[in-house]
Amino acid sequence: MAQIQEPPSAYNAKHPYNKTRTTPGGHVQMFDDTPGAEIIRTQHRAGTFVEWHPDGTEVHRVVGKGYRVVFQDDNVIIKGTCNVMIEGNAEVTIQGDAITNIQGNMNTVVEKDVNIASKGDMMLSA
């Protein structure tokens, strides 16, 4: 899998196009209309930010812990490649059925042991 890296900021502000608001606590909002380098950035004093680049790219950096809570349905459509890298453990709990449809090949590499347990019937077919 390719390394995932945060893209560089498109910040290239030129006067008089850049408008910045900084609070006494160090939070920053920036609206930059510099031609070809238009960005919007909202940043917490701790360094967490969201930034929108001229090409529509959106970058979120969370310096502390991140949480997302959705109380109704949630849908995600990605029209391109999606890479996920977890530099630690991961656990997924589904309190209902899980269905995975793969319209191509599936390759799984496990560097250590594999344990599969089923409390009901298990079927494998080719």
Image: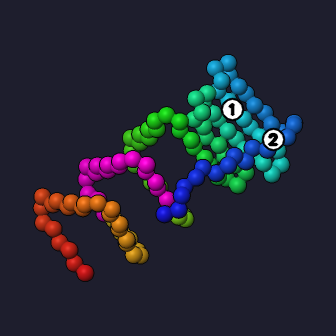
Q: Which mark is residue 13?
A: 2
Q: CA distance from mark 2 to mark 1?
A: 14 Å
Label 1 belongs to which residue?
Answer: 29
- Rendering quarter of residue 114: bottom left
Which residue is painted at 67% across and 38% down in the image? 41
Give the residue type at disc 1.
Gln
Badge 2 marks a residue whose secondary structure is: loop
Main SS category, magenta section: loop
Q: Which residues are magenta?
A: 82-99
Name the residue furthest left.
Answer: 120
Name the residue furthest front.
Answer: 112
Give the residue type at disc 2.
Ala
Q: Give the vertical position of 34 relative to 4 (above or below).
A: above
Between 118 and 108, which is closer to the camera in this rendering?
Answer: 108
| Residue 8 lies within the magenta run | no
Residue 74, image x, y percentages? 43, 50
Relative side of 126 to 46, left or right: left
Between 35 and 118, which is closer to the camera in this rendering?
Answer: 118
Which quadrant is home to the C terminus? bottom left
Q: Give the vertical position of 69 relative to 36 (above or below).
A: above
Residue 48, image x, y percentages? 57, 35
Residue 88, image x, y percentages? 39, 47
**Tell me, what colour scheme is on the image?**
rainbow
Residue 113, image x, y percentages? 25, 60
